[in-house]
Amino acid sequence: MTLRSLIGNWMSPRRATWSAGVMFVGLLLLVVWEMRHFYHNQQQQAQAHTAANAEMVAQWMESVLDASRHSLQGVAELYRLRQNQSLAQQDLANLLNRRRDSLSVWQDVAVLLPEGGIVAATAPGSFSFDDSPWLQALASNDAGSESAVSPLYREADSGTPYLLHALRIENGGGELEALVVARLSPGYIVHVVNQMPVRRGESVAILDITARVVIQRSDQQREAEALRGKAVSTEQLNAFLDSSVVSDSWVRQSPLDGDQRMFTGRKLQAAPWLVIVGENTTVYLHDWWRRFWALLIGILLLLALGSLTLRHYRQLYVAEQTLREHRNRLSEEVAARKEMQQASELKAAQLKIAALAFETHLGMFIADANNRIVQVNDTFSEITGYREEEVLGQTPALLNSGRHDADFYRAMWQQLDESGRWQGEVWNQRKSGEVYPQWLTISVVRNDAGEVTHYVATLSDITQRKAAEKEIHQLAFFDSLTGLPNRRLLIDRLEAALKDTQREGHYSAVMFIDLDNFKTINDSLGHYLGDALLNAVAARLSGIIRDNDTVARLGGDEFVVMLHKLGSNEQAATHSAEAVGQKLLKTLLEPIDVDGHMLQVSGSIGITLFHGEEVGVSAILQQADLAMYQAKAAGRNALRFFDPTMQAAVIDCAQLEADLRHVIERQELTLFYQTQVNAHGDVVGVEALVRWEHPSRGVVSPGVFIPLAEESHLIGPVGAWVMETACEQLAQWARDPSTEPLSIAVNVSPNQFRQVGFVEQVETVLAQTGANPQRLKLEVTESLLMEDLEAVCERMEQLRELGVRFSLDDFGTGYSSLAYLKRLPLDQLKIDQSFVRDVLDDPADAAIVRTVIALAHSLELEVIAEGVETQAHRDWLYSEGCMAYQGYWFSRPGPVETLSL
Ligand SMILES: Nc1nc2c(ncn2[C@@H]2O[C@@H]3COP(=O)(O)O[C@H]4[C@@H](O)[C@H](n5cnc6c(=O)[nH]c(N)nc65)O[C@@H]4COP(=O)(O)O[C@H]3[C@H]2O)c(=O)[nH]1
């Protein structure tokens, strides 16, 4: 753990000291344990070493004494020989000398008699039985052994040390006969011991039985004469001698040189001697001490370092604590200041917000409890025109416009009292006197006691908003062109009127007005004049009806007039409505000057009365619409009342339309053909005429359902079916040479022709059926040419390029124009049957037919007359130059099988 991490963890110095102390003690114990172990180890080594040396010396001494004992026994044998007379005295003496000479350890040897005589001796003067109590003891056999080694003696005169090694010679009865005594030379032993290697700190000593030094040697001093014979009795030595153990070790101060040593003592078997080998503790513990001192120094250094570190840590800790306290105090102070700053910022922001809020686009004023203005903002001044100083102390009544009565203000104050808030629209007056609408919100401010202290009012000028509302209202409910109410407002008013009639029981009327020839005027003179015309018509209609009646424009040239309260009598109401209607028709007929163009329009008016019946607004409008169509059907400038039977027709028509939607899938269509013949009466082609075989109505005429299909956009599938069937028929005829030249004229209604992809559709059908395009003739009507002549031309050209031919049907019924006749890629003109029908009786029709024929010739177009019902028709036409005919005179339309080709 680093100091930094300690600090980082904020361990207290006390704890850190404890931790360091524990660690140190742990380390110390480890060191002590190791040192102790090492100490014992060193001691054991020293003990083993001294024991080995002691053993070695002991072994050597044993061998020396063994040799001495053997020699003693040899001398004893010699003695016995002497006793047996086998050996002469002199020989014995000689033999003793030789023995002494051969044994280095012997200094002298003698055979002594117990009664004190000497049998033989190498140096007779050197032995005296009486001198030695030890010998006497041996003679008495107190020693209990056969041989023995004496303690160390000193010669009385010279002080020379010596030892005796003696052997008892016994007779057969065990009684002592003589003693063989050898005087041992300590010098020899010293000499030999001196040969032994003694290392530094080692010592070797041989002690006699009385613990006197026989020989002592150490590394410092060789054989020390002075010490020989010195008693070295110590506590440990005595204990060892008293014990029965052969070898033992101990540590103590040497009684000889004072050095501390490890001693190992070894008792000898052959003599009551000891070998003591010592090793100086200083030497064998040298490594231990060295390690001890190294570790001690290390520990002391560690201790010093630890103390320093702890001291440093304590200082750091104290500094850190102080720093932390400072930091905490600083943080608290910063937090407190921040809080104060935030509070002041918040307050400033609130003030700013309040100030900004006060200076908004809304006018604001604050009045005290007495309703006296105490503060206004700039917007207030902008709206009202009053500067602040002009209104301070005034009541808001200053702004009153006078448009609101006392009740209005009473209700305002009452609500303020009750709910503390009022808001609403108020008309006030600016300083300039201008009255304007404003949206006013007043809030009551109360103190803690609930007393009113202020009124805070916000006001916004809603002049523009009201104008915008008015404009939106105008756009939503009024026709932008004429300014008349639109369909939406008409419906609103109708609903209100319906409720009126229900409530009051009177009649009201709705008139549907459609201008008869507006479309032509609009197309020919342009939209600008068309719009001007509509405006003029609107003005005229408005000028005729009463104020509480309504004139509305539904769109295009459709206008609706609603007449209110026509009385409770139906007949009278009908008369009134009719009278108004007639008046409207009359006024419409009057020429109108539009931008210098004197235009004349007429109208068709459908009228329906309502009288609180259970009919809805849309039903009323539908009735008027139907009646208007009735009027249109009756010719222009007409007026019709709604007839309930019309309604049935409408419903019937709707049902038919629903059935028409399934006509293809139910396979209810068939194709009839009507022949077209030339001047010779030969069939040159046919016209395909579709039939609807309705399951309940029977055969429905195309004159009925084709217009319906056009209106309901079902002409596409119906026309496609006809085209496909006719082309299949052509392809079939093409296979027969007699019928191959026949052509089929197929009617194409305007909407079908204008459909996107019509050209491609024809092309596909031709390709799929394999019909010859030259045999296909498309009959188009004049009405097709009324819109976008360019596009129609282009499309016709495309079809013409496929080989398809064109016939213009119903020519003369519409706005026949030479201009487009010249431009269109036509092949044939078809004279309408309506002209043919009366051609013989009506000179006008005859003139038209003549003109058409002449026109066709001049344009190099074929011409065919339809509706030829009689021979007279045919002959007249022939005489006028028309060479192709179609009509009942030749054949009625029928299935292909009925054709006589
Ligand atoms: N009074 C009288 N009538 C004669 C005489 N000869 C023929 N008609 C009838 O006159 C109509 C001639 O056809 P349209 O003028 O093309 O007039 C057709 C045509 O405009 C339209 N129409 C018929 N089939 C189709 C069709 O497949 N597609 C389209 N778009 N229109 C068709 O329906 C109209 C009526 O067709 P239809 O009822 O079949 O009536 C046919 C035919 O039956 C006659 O001598 N006297």
Image (cartoon, rainbow, N blue to C red):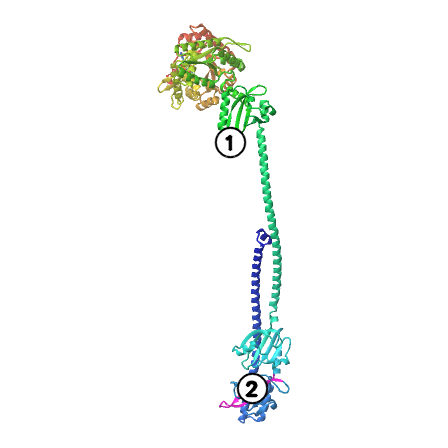
Whether residue 727 appears in magenta in the rendering, the answer is: no
What's the amino acid at mark 1? Gly
Give the label on residue 743, or none: none
Q: Horizontal and vertical percent for residue 13?
A: 58, 55
Number of numbered callouts drawn: 2
Q: Determine which residue is flagged by label 2.
A: 134
In what quadrant of the picture does the C terminus appear? top left
Q: Horizontal and vertical percent for residue 825?
A: 50, 16
Most common secondary structure along the magenta stretch: strand
| 679 is higher (above) or lower (below) than 275 | above
Numbered disc in front, either 1 or 2: 1
- Sequence-wise, the earlier of marks 1 and 2 is 2
User: Which residue is rendered at x = 60% and y = 43% of the image?
Assistant: 334
In what quadrant does ligand 1 lie?
A: top left
Q: How far, Cα to Cα, is label 1 from label 2?
A: 140 Å
Q: Horizontal and vertical percent for residue 327?
A: 60, 47
For residue 268, what is the image quadrant?
bottom right
Q: Horizontal and vertical percent for residue 199?
A: 62, 74
In magenta, the rendered stretch is 160-185
Helix, strand or loop status at disc 2 = helix
Whether residue 169 appears in magenta in the rendering, the answer is: yes
Q: Is residue 296 left or right of residue 612?
A: right
Asked whether the viewer can see residue 868, the reply is no
What's the amino acid at mark 2? Trp
| 746 is higher (above) or lower (below) than 36 | above
Q: Are marks 1 and 2 in contact (CB under 8 Å)?
A: no
Helix, strand or loop status at disc 1 = loop
| 392 is higher (above) or lower (below) than 343 | above
Q: Determine which residue is flagged by label 1.
A: 450
